[in-house]
Amino acid sequence: MLTAATIAIILALLISIARLFTTDSAADKVIVVDIASFQLLGLVVLLAIYDDSELPLQFAFILALLGFISTLILSRLITPEDP
């Protein structure tokens, strides 16, 4: 069951990366980076379940924080500023 979930998340991650290189819009790229960070988060959680270890969960927590902060920063960079 874990193998099927891992394969599904990896396929979704590859599709997201392909979308990142094929889109022209900066807003689409920010959304794709956010989705890819959550997919990586899912892979780390699956690794924690597979290894029965707590260390990957700590890494997953840091990855979730970095993904959220990077989405905020990138969305601020692409929005036009009001005078």
Image (spheres, rainbow, N blue to C red):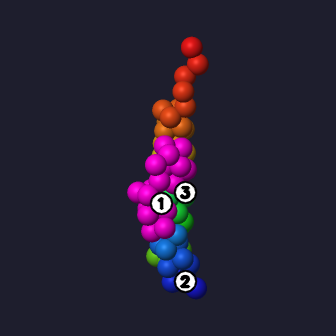
- Amino acid, disc 1: Arg
Q: Circle 2 is placed at which residue position?
A: 4
Identify which residue is drawn at 44% across, 63% down.
Answer: 18
In primary-sequence order, the first of circles 3 and 2 is: 2
Within the magenta stretch, is there residue 26?
A: yes
In the rendered image, which quarter contains the N terminus? bottom right
Front: mark 1 or 3 = 1
In the rendered image, which quarter contains the C terminus? top right
**Image coordinates for residue 61, horizontal then vertical, percent:** 52, 53
Front: mark 3 or 2 = 3
Identify which residue is drawn at 52% across, 63% down.
Answer: 39
Q: Which residues are magenta?
A: 13-35
Say which element carries label 1: helix
Within the magenta stretch, is there residue 59?
A: no
Q: Which mark is residue 35?
A: 3
Identify which residue is drawn at 49% across, 39% down.
Answer: 74
Inspect this view and state whether residue 28 appears: yes
Identify which residue is drawn at 48% across, 60% down.
Answer: 19
Q: Dot 1: few (<14), some (14–19), or many (≥20) neighbours within 10 Å?
A: some
Q: Are marks 2 and 1 in contact (CB under 8 Å)?
A: no
Q: Circle 1 is placed at which residue position?
A: 19
57, 42: nearer the viewer: 42
